[in-house]
Image (cartoon, coloured by chain):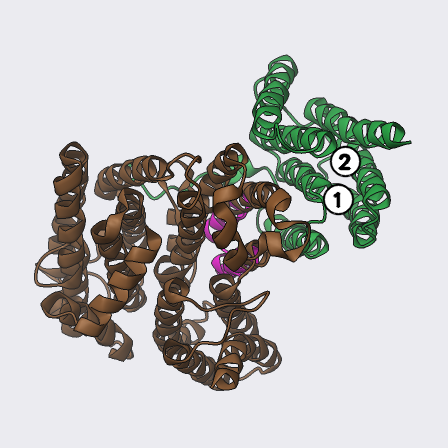
Amino acid sequence: MNDVASVAIGALLAVPALSACGLALLSSYRLTSRINVVSAGATFACAIWLLFDRPAPGQYLFVDDLNIVFVVLSTFVGFTTSAFSASYIGHEIETGKLTPAYMRFYHAMYQSLMFAMNLGLLANNIGLMWVAIELATLTTVLMVGIYRTHEALEAAWKYFILGSVGIALALFGTILVYMSAEPVLGQGYDAMVWTSLMRQAADFSPRLLNVAFVFLMLGYGTKVGLAPMHAWLPDAHAEGPTPISAVLSGLLLNVALYAILRFKMLLAANAAAIAPGPLMVTLGLVSLIFAGFMLYRRDDIKRMFAYSSIEHMGIITFAFGMGGPLANFAGLLHMTMHSLTKSAIFFAVGHIAQVKGTQKIADIRGLTESHPMLGWGLVVGVMAIAGLPPLGIFMSEFLVVSSTFARQPLLAIPLVFGLLVAFGALLTRITGLAFGEPAGGAGKVEASFVPLFAHLSLVLAAGLYLPSHLVAWFQNVARLLG
Amino acid sequence: MGNLSFDIAHLFAGGLVLVSFMLLYQDRMSGLINIFTLHAVVLSLSVGWQAYTQRAWHLFVTAAIALIFKALIIPLSLRRIMVRLRIHRTVEIIGGVGVTMLVGIGLVALSMVVMLRATAAADPLAREDLAFALSVVLLGLLMMVTRRNAVSQVIGFMSLENGLILAAAGAKGMPLVVEISVAFSVLIAFIVIGVFLFRIRERFDTVDVHQLDQFRGEYR
C-alpha cells in the first residue's frame, strides 16, 4: 500500500505545480477558473488519501500525525476558496477591475501558492521548508499587488519588505539549528531532516538552540502576524483580491505557525534548552490585546477582519505556548475553527464589497434586508469569530480559557480581557453592518453560497458535536506537541 | 597552512562587515550601488574560499551566483533604474551618519557577544564566521531602517541576505546552500527588479517609500 501513498504525496505537490504551469498558458478565464477548482479538489482528495495511508518518511518529504492535520485543513480551504474565487473573479472581470490577461497570472500564482504551502507542510527538511515558505511569500506578494492601485502597491511593498526580513531571520535560525545538530548527526542531510533531528535533539548544544529559536520565532512569527511584527498583515488583507485574503488568513498564517510548532517540539526535546512556552505566551497575549483594541478603529471591513486574524493567531500561539495536552488540543481546534470561520467571513465580505462597491464600514448598512443570504452569512460568521455559543470557536476558546485557569490563573486574566475587548468591537460593528436601514448598492449578487455555508455549517457542527474520531486524532497530536 | 587558510577566511568575512559599514554611510545612489558591488565581490571570494578549504565544490556555484548575479546583473539593472527614475540625487539617511555608525558598532559588538558565547563548543572558524555573518545581517537591517528610498532599502536587504549566505557557507557541510541562494536570487530578481520598481514608477513616478505611506484605513 505504501506505493499508492507515495503517489498521493507526490500528487499533492505535482497537481498544483503542473496546474500552475498549465493555467499560465490558458487565456479563457471561465475555463481557467474551473481548472483551478478541479485541481484544488484533486489536491484535497490526495490529502484525504494520506489521512488513511502514509508513506514511509523520506529524506525530503514525510507525513506524520502533526502535519497531516495542517495538510488536510489547508487543502480543504484551498479547494473551497477556489470555488469562491471562480464567482468572485467573474465579477471582477465584468466590472473591468481585472483584465483576462491578469487572470492567467492570478490562477498560476494561486496554484503556486498551494504548491508552496503543501511543500512547506510536508517537508522533512528544515531547509526545504524554508524555501517553500519563501516561495509562498513571493506568490502572495505578487497577488496582493495585482490591482496595481496606489494602496495595493503600498500594501504589497510593505508585505514584501517585512515578509522578506522575517524570512531572512528564519533562515539564520535554520542555519543555527543545523550548526547545533552537525556535531551530533554529522555533516550533510541528516542534520537537517526533521525525523533525525527529533531523535537526537537531546544531545544538541542548548545555547545554540536557544539563539536559533529566538530568530525562528521572530522570523516565522512575522509571517504568523504576531503583534510587533504584524504591520504587513492588515494592508495585505485589505488591498489584495478577497480570495487571497481568505487563503492568507485561513492557510498561510497556519503554515508559518506550523514551522514554529515544529521548532518548539525540537526545543522541548532538549532538556537544557530554554522553554519556548513563555516567549510564545507573551507574543500571543500581546497580539490578542493589541488587535482587540485595534478592532475599534477600523473603517475598512476587510482590514477589520485582518485584525481579527491577528487576534486569533495570538490566541492560538498563546494556547500552544501554554502547552500540555489540553491547551494543545484547544489550540489545534481553535486553529481549525478559525481557518474555516475566517475564510467563510472573507467569502461573504468579498461579495458584499462587490455589490456595495465599497469596503468602508460606514457605507454598508442593513445587509440582512438588502441581501439576506450574504447578510445572515456574515452575521453567523461574526458571531462565530466573536466566540458566541453554540459555534465551534466558543468551544475552543472555552477550552483555552479553562485550561489556563486551571494552571496559571493570573495569565487567564489578560486572556479573558483581550477576548472581551475583541468581542465588544466585533459586536458593535456587526450591528451597524447587518441591521438598520439598507445603504449602499442594492444590486443582485451572483454569488455561489456553497463554500460560505459549507464552512459555517462545519463550524456549527463542531460546536454542537465533535466526532470521537476527530477528538482522538487531535488528542494524539496534542500529546505529540508536548 | 591551516593557520593561513583560517586567516584568509577571517579576512574575507571581516572584510564583508567593513563593507557593510561603508554601505551605512553612503549618501549617494551611485556610490551605494558601487559599494554593493564590492560587497557581493567580497562575499563571493569568501564563499569561494570556504568551498576550497572545505572541499565542498557545490559552494563554488553559490560563489558564482554571488559574482555574476549580485556583482554584475543587479548593479547594472539598479543603475538603469536609477537613470530611468532619475534618482541619482543624494539619498537622505534618517538619524544622521554619526548616530547610525555608532548604532552599527553596537550591533556588531552585540553579535560578537551573543554568537561567541552561544557557539563555545563549535570550531573556531565556524564560530567567527557566524559572528561576522550575524553582524552583516544586523547591519543590513539597520540600513533598511535608516533609508526611505525603495532602492536603497532593497540594497539593504540584499546586503542582509549576503550575510545569510556567508553564514550558510560557513556551516560545515550544510546541504541545500545552493538551493537557498537560488531561492533568494529568485526572490530579489522577480520582485525587486522586475515587477515592483516598474509598477511603482509607472504609477507614481517616485520610489520614495515614504510617499507611499499614506493610506492606513483609520478614522482620522
Chain name for mark 2: B
Q: Earlier in the sequence, mark 1 or mark 2?
A: 2
Q: Which residues are magenta?
A: A134-161
Give the left or right position of residue B14, taking residue A342 as reference: right
Chain letter, brown: A
Residue drawn at point x = 16 percent, y = 32 percent: A410
Placement of B143 over or under B203, stated as above or below? above
Please state if B131 lies on the left or on the right of A265 as rendered.
Answer: right
User: In the rendered structure, the residue with mark 1 lies on which chain?
Assistant: B
Residue A338: image location, x then y, percent: 26, 59
Q: Which chain is green?
A: B
| Residue of label 1 | B78
Residue type at tag 1 = Leu
- Asked if residue A146 is among those painted magenta in the image, a careful observer would answer yes
Dot 2: element: helix
Check whether the beta carbons of the residues at disc 1 and disc 2 lie within 8 A of each other: yes
- The answer to whether tags 1 and 2 share a subunit is yes
Query: x and y percent of residue B199 in the render?
Result: 61, 54
x 65%, y 33%: residue: B122
Residue of label 2: B36
